[in-house]
Amino acid sequence: MLNREKIIENLKDVKNKVVIMSGKGGVGKSTISTYLGLSLSKEKKRVGLLDCDFHGPTIPKLLGIERFKPEVLGDKILPIEFDEYFRVLSIAFFLQSTEDAVIWRGPLKIGAIRQFLEEVHWGNLDFLLFDLPPGTGDEPLTIAQLIPPPVHCIIVTTPQEVALTSVRKSINFAKKLKMNILGIVENMSGLTCPHCGKDIPFFKKGGGEKCAMDLKIPYLGGIPFDLDLMSSSDSGKPIFYLSEDKKAKAPIMEIGKKIQNIL
């Protein structure tokens, strides 16, 4: 059986495969991937999240599960069960220390992605999310070419022009590889002053929406700076498990519902 046939067989019970990309680093893509997964799982959707950022795997830290180790059942790797509906796998789980660096060239990364796609027992999922490193290099190309279609794509940006220029490259990449672009998410979309309550356009605002309109693709929504979200991410205690009234929660939940409606 060829490798791609093994992948098709292994992912046959996954309904929707969604890649989360960004044109450049530092836009909060892994945070968006994590909280999108949480928002879908809160809707009782069965969600898997594969952290494909080998050089900067942060999702286990965001979820507070970085010390967990996956088990092996037969010839399958079992992802970490964050809760009843949410499963996670990351290269970080296989490192001896959280400070270990992954010093790999392209072939090793491609081999690891193949192994994760062939040998991880995801089971029956409504959504399998792929958190990719920024840019259009080995990891995005490998995922786009190996996972069985249709492959859906979400592109994360911040409002500044330098980030939006990179977004256009990601969109062209997705189109050339025949990925279904679900839309753009604008992260760090404004900041509410904790003292006076006024909105501050910290990185401007609305650039992602304008980019989506110009390129005629959906705009999924904007997520503002939220100090509670940042502190809960740093502490590994996701915001949805702390309170029901945090500022970033409603936009993230709304984006999750939009994606469900589209698919």
Image (spheres, grey):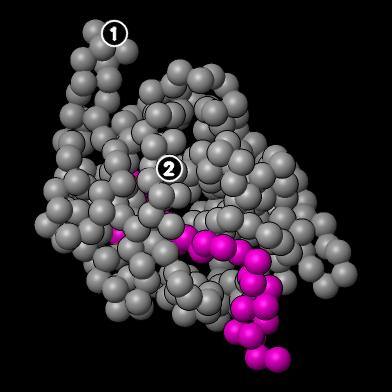
**Residue at which label 2 appears:** 257
Quadrant in the picture for the C terminus: bottom left
Residue located farthest toward the top when viewing the structure as drawn:
196
The percent coordinates of residue 118 (x first, y second) are: 68, 75
Label 2 residue SS? helix
**Residue at which label 1 appears:** 195
Q: Nearer the viewer, residue 238 or 137?
A: 238
Q: Nearer the viewer, residue 124 or 30?
A: 124
Of labels 2 and 1, earlier in sequence is 1
Label 1 residue SS? loop
Q: Which residues are magenta?
A: 1-28
Q: Residue at x 51, y 20 (%)?
A: 244
Residue located farthest toward the right when viewing the structure as drawn:
74
Within the magenta stretch, is there residue 93? no
The percent coordinates of residue 215 (x first, y second) are: 16, 61
Amino acid at the residue labelled 1:
His
